[in-house]
């Protein structure tokens, strides 16, 4: 699995905002750094398929050499994570994760439950299946949020400053753990951040955006 | 360019157009039926000449200017005072739990139809009313015969009072629904912390920092309130002067005049009424600009307070006023509906009886069922169309080429805003009569259909205005996350957006019910009386001679929508809060969270 | 089958419910009482239907009218002509010898409407108020002025667009112009109007400052008068249905100290009717309902004070002994009108006077929408 951004140009109201040409290989993380307003989030929206007025783009986005430009967001297989966990508050922890699992014949509901239970156990949240998400701490929510993204079996993951809201002690722990999970599964990831510690921890290529 | 199309997107486009058509076609058809007679064309009575004569006759009336002035001053004054009261309540209480308690206190007047609210005020304020009874200590006294200053007075103070009483809860509801949106809430909390740390009092933070964020979001509903205040009929009819009355009352009077040629005058006055509403809007925009200018100066002044003591006093006064009104109204209505003789100045009736309720319930069962069926159908339609149209706004922005998308959004948005305000800007008496004319030409037997359309026209704008704020403010990242998990737009709409918006959706539905329940003229005119609702029965009873039957009907009118709102507040919590105990036998310990 | 009728009176409404049950069980006709706040709403509707070319499937079948609403419907051809003679029981009203049955406010009915009931104007007052204020009961138009001057704010009348309001103006006009009363029974002319108005204006000019709210505000509906007497804001009022007074006391809407009487200088009297619309789809059923309304059984029930108390239009001479017995009642109520006293009646002036007097009033005192 690899994510290719081929001569990607993003325009705002017709004028060039940023250009990027990069390949992110299986298990690698590309860090994109830049101050606010430099178009970091717009880049992620372009890749995820959420680009809306007044933005537009040229170039190609490929996963495993297949173009995904013409696919609607939900068929691109690209996971996205924000600085907020954005867990669905009307669902329990378990429902959040199962909601994300692909609809295939492979899993029965009980299989899915079992797999959620294993996932939770692996991250030290065993027995939390039926908790309301609003009762979780910030660190717990961040972990559930990543589990939910992974449960969808994405072909690439976009991270939009995912650690910036966590306090320092927790940030290192969650960051290490998140990057570890992505690497283990061999998922290419694009990390947008303004924190150089994030880029260092990610250990991959770094791309600096200049303010407009 | 990420162009893709699917069924769901097409459905939302269809819904958007259907919504536009339902809002505009009945009103425009009705307007044609009013504008033609206003210019002297009304073949049914043999008037064929098109001219300005009717307007000339209207403005030649002695009290035309007075009527217009009365409409304008009562409408504008009440809206401005109601805004002041609502904003000062928000400023004083926005960081406290008092607000949710206030919502409870205000709910009776929020849900009470305007006619019913006016009748209740009349019950309290008249010289033989409850307040007079409380303060009369001579047990042989007879009610005062001196002129009262809040009822039927020339300045329309009674109208202003009743409008304020109805408007403050509505403005508060609108403001709170904006303020409860996560993004706005976060912003408000942030501004509050910053403002206070800079030494500004919490009231001045509200007016200098928070109101500028809040106001643009509630501006449209506020203008709707203003237009309604200027052109409504029920309140001035019950509490206003008649030497002369407001213009809207004159319109109604001329439409119902036995001399059918007065229809021409009525139509011309209805056209003028639209102008009066426009002038009122202009006036308020002027005041907005002055206040905005003053507001900017107040940022520079550096003053850390904002009339804090005065506003606190005003809010306490408003809260106390409502507490007294609500308690007095409840006490009075309930007792009147079961009272035997109740001589002045006793505060309790001489005995109780179920006679009045027997008469009312015998007659009201069918109307109650009609009211519920009609309200349910109308609100459900409005809700579905509004939700799909709002989703179309979101999908539409991804589904167009950028250059086209921009103009499409702004054109469609502008069109929709005009369409939403059409039914609120044209006095009901005017376009409804024109509408009946057309309904007689097409499908004259489809009575339920006609009344359904007439109600939709009024219900749709409120459902839209109340839901649009919440919908547009919903954190769009929830939808992005859900799509990134592989869920299609329709799945995201159904499984994520609707449940997250369950609260606002239920409130909008209840509001739709309440608006439908309270329609009098649309129901009467569109059905020709063939379908009676609680409100048509109540107004007929209000024109009757029994205060006791009126009281019973007012109670029914209050209880029906109140039940709707209570369900709206209670149901989302029950339906969309995940339960702790699961179907699986693998249950979790329901212990409180201890941190990780 | 729809009967459009004013729905503001509980007694009338429950009487019509009884009628609906009767015609359902007797003839299998489903009768719906469409309750109107204002009868002209229904007139407007029929006119709108005519304008839209709906000539055979109207939403109004029968309509309860008289006076101006009838004149308007007659003028615009909204009623069926000469259907009344098809009604068997219409003969019981003795129309040949009783012109009141075929004349509505001086306007010939031309068989467009059937008489249903009749009424005359009565006054009623709060006995305890008069005792407390040391007033005597005003028995004629001049005593009424004295009453108003001695107790300002305790009497009023509705706007002349209201039926009872214009009736009061007519009463004052006739009572003050008894010497030339023949003027009222011919179509109004400018000169006739100018002969009767001086006395009328002089009286009203003097009366108005002493009315409730100093005459600045006039109530829009007659029913408000009864409410305000009930609540005690007024001490004196008047009505066209004497029987509604004691029954309102029974229903607690008026207090126990209410007394009813007729003015000694004369009371305005009139008949009210049921009209059949030109575009009714149910004309045969409508006629059957009207025939029932005019039956001795239905008329006798209507006249009972506990039911409605509306005087019958049937001529007793046309009824059998058994039928006459249905109408005899002995019961009396302290608040009811003493019917043993004979009363002087004024017939309604010609219908053209209604508009003329109202317009003149509105020109002088404002239109009072």
Image (cartoon, coloured by chain):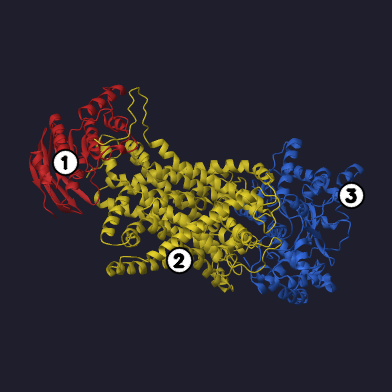
Chain colours: A red, B yellow, C blue
Figure disc tally: 3
Determine if residue C290 is in view: yes
Which numbered mark, 2 or 1, is in the foreground of this view? Answer: 1
Which corner quadrant of the image does residue C178 belong to? bottom right
Residue B148: give x, y in percent of width and height: 61, 67
Horizontally, residue C295 falls left or right of residue B82, namely right
Q: Which residue is mark 1?
A: A169
Which corner quadrant of the image does residue C232 belong to? bottom right
Q: Is residue B498 above or below residue C250?
A: above
Q: Which residue is mark 3?
A: C316
Residue at image location 84% in from the left, 67% down from the top: C265
Q: Nearer the viewer, residue A43 or C193?
A: A43
Residue at image location 29% in from the left, 47% down from the top: B397
Q: Chain of mark 1?
A: A
Q: Are marks 1 and 3 on the same chain?
A: no
* Residue B280 - label: 2
Q: Nearer the viewer, residue B248 or A15?
A: B248
Tell me the crowding category of disc 3: few under 14, some 14 to 19, or many 20 or more residues within 10 angstroms, Cα based. Answer: some
Q: Is residue B166 above or below residue A129?
A: below
Give the distance between the C-alpha atoms of the residues marked 3 and 2, in whole angstroms: 64 Å
Give the distance between the C-alpha atoms of the residues marked 2 and 1, in whole angstroms: 59 Å
Q: Are marks 2 and 1 on the same chain?
A: no
Q: Chain of mark 3?
A: C
User: Which corner quadrant holds the C terminus of chain B?
Assistant: top left
Q: Nearer the viewer, residue B386 or C98?
A: B386
Which numbered mark, 3 or 2, is in the foreground of this view? Answer: 2
Give the distance between the C-alpha atoms of the residues marked 1 and 3, in whole angstroms: 105 Å
Horizontally, residue B509 falls left or right of residue A93, namely right
Contact between labelled residues 3 and 1, with CB atoms less than 8 Å apart: no
Q: Is residue A175 above or below residue A19?
A: above
């Amino acid at each position: 699995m690899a994510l290719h951004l081929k001569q990607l140009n993003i325009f705002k109201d017709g004028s060039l905002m940023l250009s990027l040409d990069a390949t992110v290989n299986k298990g690698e993380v590309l860090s994109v750094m830049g101050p606010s307003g430099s178009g970091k989030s717009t880049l992620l929206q372009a890749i995820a398929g959420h680009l809306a007025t007044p933005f537009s783009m040229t170039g190609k986005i490929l996963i495993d050499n297949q173009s995904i430009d013409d696919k609607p967001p939900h068929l691109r297989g690209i996971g996205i994570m924000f600085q907020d966990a954005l867990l669905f508050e009307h669902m329990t922890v378990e429902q959040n994760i199962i909601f994300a699992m692909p609809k295939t014949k492979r899993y029965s509901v009980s299989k899915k439950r079992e797999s959620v239970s294993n996932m939770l156990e692996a991250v030290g949240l065993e027995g939390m299946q039926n908790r309301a998400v609003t009762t979780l701490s910030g660190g717990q929510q961040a972990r559930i949020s990543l589990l939910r993204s992974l449960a969808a079996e994405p072909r690439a993951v976009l991270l939009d400053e995912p650690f910036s809201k966590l306090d320092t002690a927790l940030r290192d722990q969650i960051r290490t753990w998140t990057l570890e999970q992505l690497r283990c599964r061999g998922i290419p990831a694009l990390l947008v951040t303004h924190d150089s510690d994030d880029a260092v921890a990610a250990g991959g290529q770094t791309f600096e955006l200049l303010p407009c | 360019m990420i162009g893709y199309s699917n069924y769901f997107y097409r459905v939302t486009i269809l819904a958007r157009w259907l919504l536009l058509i339902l809002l505009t076609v009945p009103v425009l058809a009705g307007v044609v039926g009013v504008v033609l007679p206003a210019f002297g064309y009304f073949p049914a009575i043999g008037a064929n000449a098109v001219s300005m004569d009717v307007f000339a006759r209207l403005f030649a009336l002695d009290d035309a200017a007075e009527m217009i002035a009365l409409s304008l001053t009562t409408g504008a004054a009440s809206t401005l005072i109601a805004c002041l009261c609502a904003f000062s309540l928000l400023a004083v209480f926005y960081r406290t739990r008092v607000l949710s308690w206030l919502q409870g206190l205000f709910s009776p007047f929020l849900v009470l139809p305007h006619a019913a609210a006016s009748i209740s005020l009349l019950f309290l304020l008249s010289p033989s009313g409850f307040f007079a009874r409380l303060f009369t200590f001579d047990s042989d006294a007879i009610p005062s015969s001196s002129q009262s200053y809040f009822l039927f007075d020339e300045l329309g103070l009674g109208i202003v009072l009743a409008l304020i009483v109805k408007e403050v809860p509505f403005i508060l509801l609108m403001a709170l629904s904006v303020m409860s949106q996560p993004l706005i809430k976060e912003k408000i909390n942030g501004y509050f912390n910053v403002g206070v740390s800079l030494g500004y009092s919490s009231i001045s933070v509200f007016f200098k920092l928070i109101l500028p964020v809040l106001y643009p979001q509630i501006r449209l509903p506020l203008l709707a309130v203003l237009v309604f205040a200027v052109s409504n009929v029920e309140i001035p009819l019950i509490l206003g002067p008649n030497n002369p009355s407001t213009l809207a009352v004159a319109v109604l009077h001329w439409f119902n005049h036995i001399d059918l040629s007065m229809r021409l005058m009525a139509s011309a006055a209805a056209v003028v009424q639209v102008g009066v509403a426009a002038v009122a809007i202009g006036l308020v925009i002027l005041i907005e600009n002055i206040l905005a200018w003053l507001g900017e100066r107040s940022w520079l002044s550096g003053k850390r307070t904002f009339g804090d003591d005065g506003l606190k006093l005003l809010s306490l006064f408003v809260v106390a006023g409502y507490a007294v009104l609500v308690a007095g109204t409840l006490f009075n209505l309930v007792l009147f509906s079961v009272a035997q003789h109740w001589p002045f100045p006793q505060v309790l009736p001489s005995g109780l009886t179920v006679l009045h309720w027997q008469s009312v319930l015998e007659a009201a069962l069918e109307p109650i069922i009609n009211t519920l069926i009609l309200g349910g159908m109308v609100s459900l339609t409005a809700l579905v169309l509004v939700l799909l149209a709002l989703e179309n706004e979101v999908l539409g922005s991804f589904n167009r080429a950028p250059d086209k998308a921009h103009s499409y959004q702004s054109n469609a948005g502008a069109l929709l805003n005009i369409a939403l305000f059409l039914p609120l800007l044209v006095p009901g008496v005017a376009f409804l009569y024109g509408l009946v004319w057309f309904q007689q030409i097409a499908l004259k037997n489809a009575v339920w259909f006609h009344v359904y359309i007439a109600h939709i026209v009024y219900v749709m704008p409120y459902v839209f205005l109340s839901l649009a704020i919440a919908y547009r403010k919903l954190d769009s990242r929830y939808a992005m996350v859900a799509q990134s998990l592989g869920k299609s737009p329709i799945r995201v709409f159904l499984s994520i957006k609707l449940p997250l918006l369950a609260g606002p959706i239920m409130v909008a539905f209840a509001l739709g019910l309440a608006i439908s329940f309270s329609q009098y003229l649309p129901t009467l005119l569109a059905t020709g009386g063939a379908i009676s609702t609680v409100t048509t029965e109540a107004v007929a009873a209000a024109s009757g001679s029994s205060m006791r039957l009126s009281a019973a009907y007012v109670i029914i009118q209050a209880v029906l929508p109140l039940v709707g709102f209570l369900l709206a507040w209670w149901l989302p919590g029950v339906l969309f809060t995940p339960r702790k105990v699961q179907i699986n036998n693998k249950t979790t310990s329901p212990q409180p969270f201890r941190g990780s | 089958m729809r009967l459009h009728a004013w729905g503001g009176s509980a007694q009338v409404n429950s009487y019509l419910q009884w009628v609906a049950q009767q015609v359902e069980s007797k003839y299998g006709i489903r009768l719906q009482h469409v309750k109107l706040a204002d009868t002209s709403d229904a007139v407007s509707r029929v006119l709108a239907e005519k304008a839209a070319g709906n000539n055979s499937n109207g939403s109004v079948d029968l309509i309860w009218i008289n006076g101006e609403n009838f004149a308007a419907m007659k003028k615009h051809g909204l009623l069926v002509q000469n259907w009344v003679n098809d009604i068997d029981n219409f003969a019981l009203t003795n129309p040949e010898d009783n012109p009141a049955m075929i004349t509505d406010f001086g306007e010939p009915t031309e068989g467009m409407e059937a008489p249903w009931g009749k009424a005359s104007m009565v006054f009623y007052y709060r006995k305890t108020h008069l005792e407390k204020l040391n007033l005597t009961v005003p028995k004629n138009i001049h005593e009424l002025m004295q009453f108003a001057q001695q107790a300002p704010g305790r009497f009023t009348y509705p706007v002349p667009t209201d039926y009872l309001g214009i009736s009061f103006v007519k009463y004052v006009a006739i009572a003050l112009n008894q010497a030339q009363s023949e003027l009222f029974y011919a179509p109004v002319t400018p000169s006739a109007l100018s002969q009767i108005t001086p006395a009328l204006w002089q009286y009203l000019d003097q009366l108005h400052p002493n009315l409730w709210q100093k005459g600045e505000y006039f109530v829009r509906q007659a029913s408000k008068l009864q409410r305000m007497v009930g609540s005690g804001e007024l001490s004196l009022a008047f009505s066209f249905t004497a029987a509604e007074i004691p029954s309102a006391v029974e229903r607690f809407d008026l207090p126990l100290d209410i007394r009813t009487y007729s003015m000694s200088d004369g009371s305005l009297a009139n008949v009210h009717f049921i009209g059949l619309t030109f575009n009714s789809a149910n004309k045969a059923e409508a006629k059957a309902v009207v025939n029932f309304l005019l039956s001795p059984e239905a008329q006798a029930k209507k006249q009972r004070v506990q039911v409605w108390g509306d005087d019958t239009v049937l001529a007793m001479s046309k009824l059998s002994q058994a039928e006459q017995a249905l109408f005899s009642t002995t019961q009396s109520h302290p608040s009811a009108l003493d019917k043993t006293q004979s009363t002087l009646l004024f017939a309604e002036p010609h219908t053209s006077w209604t508009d003329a007097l109202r317009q003149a009033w509105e020109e002088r005192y404002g239109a009072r929408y």
